[in-house]
Amino acid sequence: MKRKITIISIIFSLAFALLSFNSINDKTPYEAEYFNKLNDLKTEQSDLLQLIQQSELTPDGIAHIKGRIQLCRNKMKGIDFWLRYLEPVSYKSINGPLPVEWETEVFEKFEKPYRRDGAGLTLASLYLDESDINKDTLLHLIQTSLNVMDVYKADTVVSHLKTPDHFFLCNRLYLLNLAAIYTTGFECPDPAQVVPELRLMMHEVKNIYSIYNLSFPDKALPDEYLALYEKALTFVDAQNNDMNKFNHYDFIREFVNPLFTLNQQYIQQYHVFSKSMVDYSLNKNVTSIFSKSLYNGQNAKGIFLRVKDSATLAEIDRVGHLLFFDPILSGNNRRSCASCHKPEQYFADTLGSSNLQFNNTEALPRNTPSLVNAGYNHLLMLDGKHTSLQNQVHDVITNKVEMGSDENEVLQKVLSCKEYKKVFTALLKLTPQEKEITIEHIASAITYYYSKFSQTQSPFDNAMNNKSSLSASETEGFNLFMSKAQCGTCHFVPMFNGVKPPYVGSEFEVLGVPADTNFKKLSPDNGRYVVFQADETKNAFRTGTIRNAAMTAPYMHNGVFKNLNQVIDFYNNGGGAGKGLNVPNQTLSSDSLKLTVMEKTKLIAFIKTLNEPLRPELPPKSLPKSSNPLLNNRKVGGIY
Amino acid sequence: MKLIVTIFILLSGIYSLQVFATDKKDKTAELYEFPDAMAQPVRNQFMVLCEKGRILYDISCGKCHNTKVNGKTIIPDFTIEQLGAYSIRVANQKHEMNVSEENVSAEELALITTYLTYKKKNH
């Protein structure tokens, strides 16, 4: 009997061992597809290298190479779904949009910007258009893209393919990119190829979907999703090859966003969890791309992050409101936050010229940015100087040319008011890591207060969420924004700022903004270069949002343009370089966009749909009384 | 008699408070191990950060990570790899939920890692 049991158990354990051995070695059809496509791309890259080595860089030779690059791009598009998500840094070597990028992604924000060298197919194609080219540079761009391919075979990457989690997260990024970049010509050097490449990619992804469902029937992509995706394919197949005629509005509204909603549902339903930094700021619970909670930019609550109770939050908001209008925060008790960030002007200063310095005579060098939607940037200020909203408040208060106070003085003055002291003493208990009330408490109350004004949805959002619709010219304006006018390649859907999917970094651009409208010289402001010195950062500024643009004139870092027409003309003429200024590192093409008067009107009609209707905000009736009588004649909102 | 007893109790109370206070200060320093090369003023600054991190760790991490041995709370030693700052957020499924940006800010995470880096090891 005992022997029998032993034999049986040996047989069973052998069978088990064999089975598990099998499951380690055998690839699922899904994994096999991944490796096949990876190898296809590698073969195409090697062939391309060979062709370049054998070709002469004559016009004919160049045309031939370009054709081959396109074939390679097609293979890349077939696997983009995985590449971009599973290893985003290596992806930049396969299809980087810029030769050099200085990146500070949100999870690296305490570190110096990283230099990331771009390489690959887009840059190679653009290089072929330059006048003085050599083979070595071209070969290098392609060789670099081939070199990183092995990263995608590493265990750390491949292990993701064993479970379904990554699939829904890859798909989420894919859908976000369908809305934000795949239809705009971002990372695609030839505008004529944007729609054909999109079509090809969408069909390849359909294929990935069915093979995924074969391999993971338990967590399959449901029929509801597949049916809608099929409709999206039919829609795209029927669209004109010309990207300027592509209906971006319907594509996103009828297909991409509803598909995103479903995918988010599955992420919840299947308890998908992420192991990737790519998903750092995306919100799992959101049901639309056009929700103000799609991604987490800044922590508006600051030091009060852990406070969840609504009565306490209301108290923080109330004291934040008082402080926002209280000139006690300035060195001379005559300026408040509201002096420059005027609530009735979208928390900006639409007069531009009245950006006075602390000395009440000279003007500040930069245009006051709106606080509305400021929190959707990972780096703050036009030069990306600050990593948190609270740092920014702290800096303005202590800046000699702005509010001209200092940390201790502000604390002492604020706490000399009984009302402030009472509230902050109570709040101190909720921040046990701090032994006493600090300027962080004050700054956090202010940022919490004004951040609520960023929660309003615009008519455009409502239209995208199918709650209303836009007029024909507004819709056409959006389609222009995403295609011919090339706005969407820097102002990304849905926040229309420089934060693109997966929404982990802020982008900077060099536009060649002039000192004045005579275009005689470049604005002397070095921008990002002040914070971080590199050739690429000279005169670079963080891309602002188009939301509320119609309400927040003047425009650009120095407020040089007084209305939207001037801004659109500036871009239409190819920025500073297009106007003959010497801007060697301009990131904007110096070619004209060739927009017609009618097209410009439509663009502005669309931009106006991004106005978020803010409720009127009134200043407090009075300010807290201080024990120092000299402080008690201060004026609500300050004097200048 | 009653008065004498009250005074005695009060005095002993004050004394024990004082002992406790000095005790606490020494204990704080004992909680950490700083590199020998770190100068005292820098050490003091780090100690302030570590103390903030310690309190935040107790609130956000301790519940899952701490263990009790003979009634004594043991805070585990973490490796440098485990303390890879931002990767903490996606270390596992629980972290994805509990160490999200809504629950622990980037600044707080930096304080917690500082604390865990200089915390005295359990051996």
Image: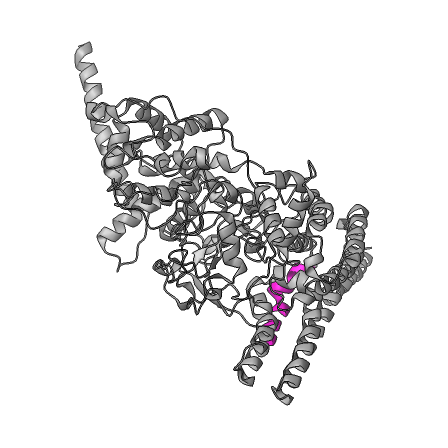
Question: Start and end of the magenta stretch?
Answer: A146-161
Instruction: Name above or below for residue A586 compared with residue B66.
Output: below
Q: Identify the coloring.
A: one colour
**Residue A337: x, y in percent?**
35, 36
Is residue A159 inside the magenta stretch?
yes
Side (left or right) of B71 relative to A255: left
Instruction: Name above or below for residue A446 compared with residue A119.
Output: above
Side (left or right) of A402 relative to A30: left
User: How many marks do you count on the picture?
Assistant: 0
Instruction: Name above or below for residue A630 compared with residue A399.
Output: above
Residue B88 seen = no
Q: Quadrant of the N terminus of chain A?
A: bottom right
Residue at (69% x, 46% y) in the render: A257
Identify which residue, B17 or A165, lies in the foreground.
Answer: A165
**Residue A593: x, y in percent?**
58, 61
Q: Quadrant of residue A534?
A: bottom left
**Residue A539: x, y in percent?**
40, 61
Q: Quadrant of the C terminus of chain A?
A: top left
Identify which residue, A21 or A159, lies in the foreground.
Answer: A159
Is residue A308 inside the magenta stretch?
no
**Residue A268: x, y in percent?**
67, 43
Residue B26 seen = yes
Side (left or right) of A293 relative to A220: left
Instruction: Name above or below for residue A331 compared with residue A381.
Output: above
Predominant secondary structure in magenta?
Answer: helix
